[in-house]
Image (cartoon, rainbow, N blue to C red):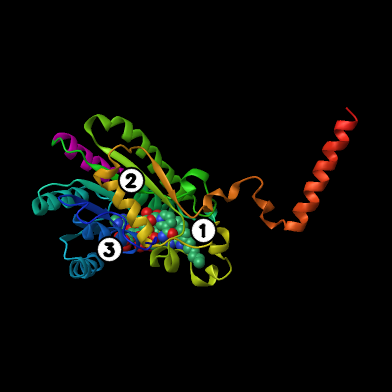
């Protein structure tokens, strides 16, 4: 058994319908694939219908599951409502939502136009709360114990230069996750989030971080567990969080990053110290302590 394998048992998501925003590509596609394998009906939506339809056809063939592809810009409430209506028409009800759609630019902030900032914040924050609000109203009205999973980032906690609009928006998503988890708990609605570290996708690798720039940095070396994430690892955690197995977890943000976010630890620079240097340091510290005891 390894981390590249599915974790939940067959049928773990039977009778559930889950909407995955941005489900035509990258991590959204990987989550959608695993949900289908576990028996869920899946709705994928984003702006590019042809991408969604190609993915839907591929996943239907691969998993034998039921998948619906609908064009939707998550910044537009009428398009979100259309996704929900069509999903209910086809599958009877909606049980889960994965807010995975995102936009991001790596750039010095002072180079960004107002519109560039709005573009990222509107997709990530506005898109997430619009979709969550629309489904929350439907769940409360119909007494459905729905589940929301938000895909955040580790820098939503720590902040990060050069991705400021994304950091602001993802931090807002975390605040919403925790706030609504409390408020909607009385309706049985749960909200959780995953904060992924680096997971290779075309969207993040080729379009966000061009190869020329990537060559200058080694991501693997920055990560304590010395590798990037595997899509199945994220899909496993996502499936667990949308399933009833996690019924007692709400308002939680789970970091899945090989320890990358821990690099701020104050003494982590000591990773560079060799065994010989540690011997010398230990001797010096013990001597200093002995001397200070003598002079007391
Ligand atoms: C081994 C090394 C690998 C390194 C990989 C590391 C990855 C780590 C992961 C970090 C965390 C990741 C978080 C993510 O969110 S990744 C997933 C997101 N995926 C993408 O963002 C995909 C790429 N982008 C897009 O799909 C689109 O650009 C986007 C959806 C973001 C916006 O598209 P839209 O068509 O709506 O927008 P416009 O092109 O019209 O632009 C709007 C304004 O923004 C300005 N702009 C556009 N690009 C940039 C840029 N790169 N820098 C600055 N400004 C930009 C554009 O000019 C428009 O503004 P103006 O009209 O005022 O000019
Ligand atoms: N890959 C990584 O290392 C990391 C990823 N993440 C997060 O994981 C998630 C998935 O990212 P990833 O798979 O890497 O990247 P992708 O670029 O593949 O995914 C982004 C998706 O968002 C969709 N999207 C963009 N704008 C809109 C919009 N206005 N309305 C609806 N959908 C939209 C895109 O589809 P379309 O263009 O058709 O609209 C695309 O499918 C994101 O939330 C990202 O922030 C977080 C940390 C690290």
Is the CB of the residue bearing disc 3 within 8 angstroms of ligand 2? yes
Note whether 86 is above or below 173 in the view shown: below
Q: Quadrant of the C terminus?
A: top right
Other residues around mark 2 within 10 Å, as few (<14) / some (14–19) / many (≥20): many
Q: Secondary structure at mark 1?
A: loop
Residue 126: numbered disc: 2
Q: Secondary structure at mark 3?
A: loop
Please state the quadrant of the image where ligand 1 appears.
bottom left
Magenta region: which residues? 127-141
Q: Quadrant of the N terminus?
A: bottom left
* Point 18% across, 56% down: residue: 39
Q: x, y percentage for residue 289? A: 82, 37
Is the CB of the residue bearing disc 1 within 8 angstroms of ligand 1? yes
The residue singled out by tag 3 in the image is 24
Judged from this view, the residue extending furthest toward the right is 295
Q: Nearer the viewer, residue 295 or 139?
A: 295
């Amino acid at each position: 058994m390894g981390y590249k394998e599915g974790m939940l048992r067959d049928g773990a998501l039977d009778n559930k319908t889950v909407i995955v925003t941005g489900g035509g590509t990258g991590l959204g596609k990987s989550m959608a694939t695993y949900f289908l394998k576990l028996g869920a009906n899946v709705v994928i939506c984003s702006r590019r219908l042809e991408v969604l339809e190609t993915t839907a056809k591929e996943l239907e063939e691969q998993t034998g599951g039921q998948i619906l592809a609908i064009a939707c810009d998550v910044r537009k409430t009428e398009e979100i409502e259309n996704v929900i209506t069509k999903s209910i028409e086809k599958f009877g009800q909606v049980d889960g939502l994965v807010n995975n759609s995102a936009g991001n630019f790596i750039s010095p902030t002072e180079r960004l136009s107002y519109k560039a900032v709005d573009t990222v914040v509107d997709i990530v924050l506005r898109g997430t709360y619009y979709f969550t609000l629309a489904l929350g109203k439907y769940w409360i009205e119909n007494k459905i114990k729905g589940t929301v999973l938000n895909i955040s980032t580790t820098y939503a906690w720590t902040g990060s230069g050069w991705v400021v609009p994304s950091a602001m928006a993802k931090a807002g998503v975390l605040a919403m996750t925790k706030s609504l988890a409390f408020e909607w708990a009385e309706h049985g609605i749960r909200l959780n989030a995953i904060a992924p570290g680096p997971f290779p996708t075309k969207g993040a690798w080729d379009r966000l971080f061009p190869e020329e720039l990537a060559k200058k940095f080694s991501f693997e070396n920055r990560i304590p567990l010395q590798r990037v994430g595997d899509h199945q690892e994220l899909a496993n955690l996502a499936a667990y969080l949308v399933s009833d197995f996690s019924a007692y977890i709400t308002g939680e943000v789970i970091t899945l990053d090989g320890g990358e976010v821990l690099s701020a630890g104050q003494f982590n620079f000591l990773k560079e110290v060799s065994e010989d240097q540690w011997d010398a340091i230990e001797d010096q510290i013990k001597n200093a302590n002995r001397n200070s005891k003598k002079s007391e």
